[in-house]
Image: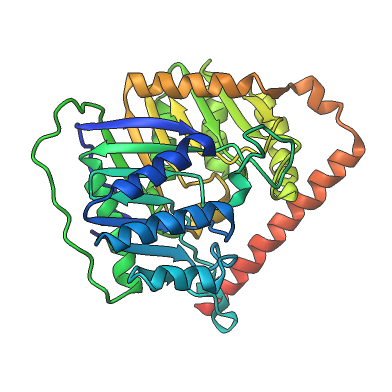
Amino acid sequence: MKAGYTFPWRSHNSFQILVDSNNFYPQMLAAIKQAQHFIFLEQYLVSSGEVFERFIQALTSSARRGVKIFILFDDYGAQNVTRSDIQQLKQENISFVSYNPFQWKNLYSSLRRNHRKLLLIDNQTAYVGGAGLSDVYQAIDNQLIHSHAMNWHDIVLEIKGQVVNDWYLSFAQIWKKCSSIRLPESAIRDQYPGLNQPGRVILATGPGKNNIIKSALRNIKKSKEYVWIATPYFLTTRKLRHALSKAAKRNVDVRLLVPGPISDHAWISHAARRYYRRLLHNGVKIYEYQPRFLHAKIILADDWISIGSSNLDRWNQFWNLDANQAARDIELAKQTHYLFESDFKQCELITYDLWKQRPWRQRFSEWWASYAVRFIQWLVYIASRIRK
């Protein structure tokens, strides 16, 4: 598989959206406990704590039953995993690899991170989305709490069918670059009775090789009814913002679902708001999610859906490895539409008139944050030129 390759459409699949940790963690843990042959786990955001301990127990228990397990964590994203947790995994002969260990002497190369999130079981079921393995997704006593530190709002997509083997190939591609340990060969089924939802795996593999964004642009430009996007960090390119504005001008219902007062990086939210004025003026509706930190990454353009690890910030678009599941299916579009509608009810709708009346302190926050982002982008550009 070549870098930047986008897999073809596969016809025989099923997709199920799992909303929030009280739904997706139990499903993922149950799948690990039921595994018979092998487990592949690829993650960016991992932290030692209650959530990761539950996964350690499930993984080590499966390893003792003879299940082959391969874990690939991003070195920077998993910096809060303790050595003792990693040792627990290795003691059970679980293959563990860190992607691109951070090195100050090689700072430029260290900027590239593996932002993908994947759990793959027996080449039968895959779980992909925006969620990591961390206590930040936990609720206290199963109640929603108003805190930036806990109970992040996210989704995971449960996948069965033909595309699961493509997820295996995407994992294998990165694994081979990081480890000499051979992976077991995947077994491809000939038939998938009852699975009829079309889908394709789309990848981002570095600068100029982001098929996730390219696919999004194509479908936004073709949209006729609506384009709804959820993203935690709306620091996107001018090209994507123009595509959204043009869609709104041709009477497509364009909506952005973004974090409100609760964010893990408030300055990024401030910087993203510098785009509001023009988008609102062009007819784009902007909804700021109020109860919790919104970390979901979803694009819905008519009956085309894209769900995965990819944010719409420039860093993700140019530096990170990302992977999304795309689908074109009316039933899945209805599920996604319902999820958006539910979230919109918990948002503040930002109007153009309201935006013009925002206080000077908010304007100042947007100003300094946007210039901070530009400065960081300039430093990265200079570093890239020096390296060349």
Report the residue that reaches farthest toward the bottom. Answer: 105
Position in image of residue 213 (x %, y %): 44, 43
User: Quick check: 372 above or below 283?
Assistant: below
Does any portion of residue 374 appear in the rendered image? yes
Compared to residue 23, the image places residue 265 above or below, namely below
Q: Which image quarter is the N terminus in? A: bottom left
* Colour setting: rainbow
Decide if residue 208 is in sight here.
Answer: no
User: As rendered, which of 256 and 124 lies closer to the eye?
Assistant: 124
Q: Nearer the viewer, residue 197 or 372?
A: 197
32 vs 251, left or right, is: left
Q: Is residue 271 left or right of residue 233?
A: right
Q: Position of residue 65 (x, y in %)?
A: 27, 59
Outermost residue to the left: 190
Name the spot of residue 56 as percent of width and height, x first. Answer: 45, 59
Q: Is 71 displayed left or right of 315 in the figure?
A: left
Q: 110 above or below 238?
A: below
The residue sitting at 57% across, 38% down in the picture is: 231
Q: Residue at x 53, y 15 (%)?
A: 251
Quadrant for residue 215, please give it: top left
Percent x, y of residue 168: 26, 53
Total labels drawn: 0
Q: Name the residue at 64% across, 18% down.
A: 345
Q: Is residue 146 left or right of residue 176?
A: right
Q: Residue at x 36, y 40 (%)?
A: 325
Residue 84 drawn above or below residue 261: below
Q: Quadrant of residue 171?
A: bottom left
